[in-house]
Amino acid sequence: MHLFGILCCQVYMYHLSFPDDAKHIKALVYGIFTVDLAATVMAMADMYHWFAAGFGNLLFVDDVYLSAFDTPMLGAVLAAIAQGFYCYRLLKLKKNTWPICVLVILIALAGVTAGVYGAIVGHQEKTFSRAAKKTLPAIYVIYVGSAAADVLIAVTMTALLLHSRQKTHKQSHYMIKRIINLTVETNLLSSFLALLTVILLVAIPNTNYFTCPSMILGKIYSNSLLLMLNNRAYLSAGALTIPSASNPSSSGSTSRGTSTFKMSWHAPSKSFGNTTTATSQTYSLRDMDPKYGVSKPIAM
C-alpha cells in the first residue's frame, strides 16, 4: 500500500506538471495507474481472504483466491509496459539499439503470455500446493525473463548515456549522471525482486512466500516509469544550472498554469573579496522530453 500511495502522488505530480504531454504519453501514465489500481484492489482482497476471513484456518493460506490474477498476470503486464517505455527511450537515443529493444519486447510478451497461463492454471487448481508444479515453467519465464530484460535495459542505457556524455557540455554531465543513476537503480531493484521470487519458490517449495516480492515487483515497475517521467521536473529545476559544491542555496517556485520552475543558485563564480554572484533561470516543464529528460516538448 505504501508503494501504491507513492504512485498516487507521482500521478498527481505528473498531472500538475505536464499538462501538455502527448496524448499517448498521458494514456500510458493513466493506463499503468489503472492496472496497478486493479492489482492493488485484488491484493487487498487476497489479504482479507487469507488473514481475516480465514483467520486461524491454515487452509485459507493455501487458497490461491485472486492472487493468480494480480501477481503473475497483472504483474507481467506492468513489467511489459515499463520495459516497453524503456525500449522507446532507447530507440529515441539511438536507432541502432533496435535489436536489443526487439529482444526485450519479445521477453516482455513472453512474460505476459506466461502470466495469463499462470493465472488460468492457478485459478483452476485453487491451491498453491496443487498449482506450484504446473505453473513453475511460467514463473521462470516471467521472473527470470524480467530480470534479464531489466539488466539489458540498464546496461544499454548506461552505455549510451556515458557515450553521449563525452559529446556534451560539462553542464549536462550532472543531468546525465542523475538519469544513469535512476536507470540503474530502478532496473537493478526490479531484477533483484524478480530473482528473489524465483529463489523463494525453488528454495522453499510448497509455500507462498514467493508472493511477497512478486506483489511488490509490479509496483516497482509502475513507480519507476512515473519516476523517469517526473524526473524532468527535477532536471528543469536544478540540473540545467549546476549547484556549486561550496554551500549552494536554492529557491524554487511552481505554477499550475505555466508549469515553470525558477531556480537561483548562489555560487562564487567570480570572487572579489568575500562577495559572490547569483545566477537565476526559469525553465518550462513543457520543454522537457521523456527520452532524455530535457530539451523538447513531448509531441511524438
Image: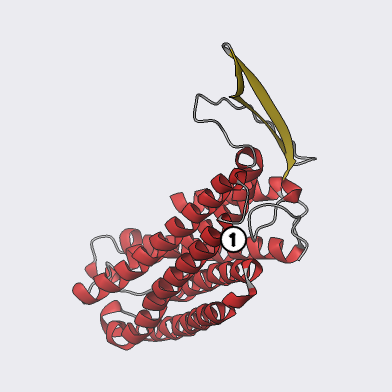
207 sits to left or right of 65? left
Is residue 66 visible to the viewer in this orientation of the structure?
no
At horizontal 52% and vertical 83% (from top left) the residue drawn is: 106
Q: Residues within 10 Å of mark 1 (few under 14, many from 20)?
A: many
Q: Which residue is mark 1?
A: 33
Which residue shows up at 51% across the image and 78% down it? 104
State the quadrant of the C terminus.
bottom right
Residue drawn at x 49%, y 62% is: 158
Residue in the picture at 45% in, 72% down = 152
190 or 63: which is nearer to us? 190
Quadrant in the picture for residue 266: top right
Residue 113 x %, y %: 49, 85
Q: Position of residue 177 (x, y in %)?
A: 51, 50
**Horizontal arrangement in the rendering, residue 217 relative to residue 13 (left or right):** left
Q: Position of residue 6 (x, y in %)?
A: 51, 49
Label 1: state its secondary structure.
helix
| Residue, far top | 273
Of 33 and 160, which appears nearest the observer?
160
**Residue 287 seen from this side:** yes
Residue found at the very far bottom of the displayed protein: 134
Q: Quadrant of residue 233?
A: top right
Is residue 11 or residue 299 the one in the foreground? 299
Q: Residue furthest left?
A: 204
Q: Position of residue 175 (x, y in %)?
A: 57, 47
Instruction: Name the amino acid, label 1.
Output: Phe
